[in-house]
Image (cartoon, rainbow, N blue to C red):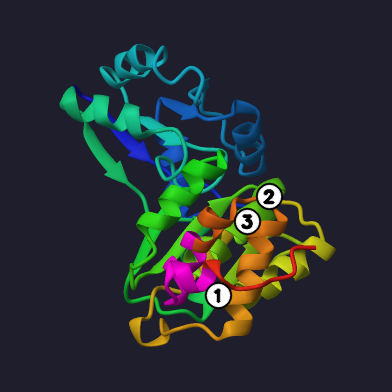
Amino acid sequence: MAGILYIVPTPIGNLEDITLRALRVLREVSLIAAEDTRTTARLLAHYGIQTPQTSYHEHNKLTKLDLVLTALETGDVALVSDAGTPGLSDPGYELIRAAIKAGVQIVPLPGASALLPALVASGLPTDRFTYLGFLPRRPQARRAVLGEAKTLRDTLVIYEAPHRLIETLTDIREVLGIRQVVVARELTKLYEEIWRGPVDRAIVHFTDRPVRGEITLVVEGFEPEQAGRWDEADVRAALARRLAQGEARSAAARAVADQSGWSRREVYDLDVDQS
């Protein structure tokens, strides 16, 4: 094929966060494949760009493949998402795969994303990190993903919706234990907030202050030297919390034992207030 597929990051909030190269590419390509043409239209209008668009999003991405591949036979195409880097927790993966299979040259441009700004501003180690993307919506599946990451020493980076923030923070506490977390909200926008502290304090803080906007969570990695036996007060509190939520004592004891360094029998036999 003659055309090039450009992967073009767009601002995650502040419209100034776009490169000169990205603006040139958006002006010069024959077609822009956009996750939401209305959102991209505002960006294009801001910079006086009149390149034609076609929608390419989660619900039509497979049916639009042929259209975009046909456009690539005669010209260049830019792939953009609503905000940030296409293909990174955004539509684009299938198109990129199909274009590679068809022999199309792929040219990725560097640019905006929430992942790296949140990570470097977190104050947590950046030499090794694992990106978990959006966690599953169902609690059991979400806890399973966190369980797989439990012993990773890497800093963890997670995208989350505001209405699931407390649920996810609670699962982090229950599955990973008390770790330092960073809640980065509305990065680059007017109400940007970067909150740092232990996960139990984060739950209290954001329960009292419901949040809006896009959220990136950065979570401290596993530290073996910090994974010793819990104090009895912490074990009692964790067990009581699970019992108060209606969990069976045997299941609650097993879960707390896995985290605390206590045996299941020791936890099970504790006399705790379930109120």
Q: Badge 1: how crowded within 10 Å, few (<14), some, or many (20+)? A: some
User: Separation of disc 1 and disc 3 at Cα?
Assistant: 20 Å
Which residue corresponds to the image point at 65% horizontal and 28% vertical from the top-left?
Answer: 38
* Range shown magenta: 254-267
Q: Secondary structure at mark 1?
A: loop
Q: Secondary structure at mark 2?
A: loop
Residue 77 is situated, as x and y percent measured from the top left of the image, at 37, 29
Q: Quadrant of residue 236?
A: bottom right
Image height of 212 relative to 8, above or below: below
54 left or right, relative to 193:
left
Q: Which mark is residue 215?
A: 3
Q: Amino acid at mark 2?
A: Gly
Q: Amino acid at mark 3?
A: Ile
Q: Which mark is residue 246?
A: 2
Q: Amino acid at mark 1?
A: Ile
Q: Of helix, strand and loop, which mostly describes the magenta segment?
A: helix
Query: Is residue 256 located in the magenta-colored stretch of the structure?
Result: yes
Q: Are marks 2 and 3 in contact (CB under 8 Å)?
A: no
Q: Secondary structure at mark 3?
A: strand
Query: Mark 1 or 3 closer to N-term?
Result: 1
In-front residue for pair 168/266: 266
Quarter containing the N terminus:
top left
Q: Residue furthest right?
A: 208
Image height of 218 relative to 136, above or below: below
Q: Which mark is residue 178?
A: 1
User: Separation of disc 2 and disc 1 at Cα?
Assistant: 22 Å
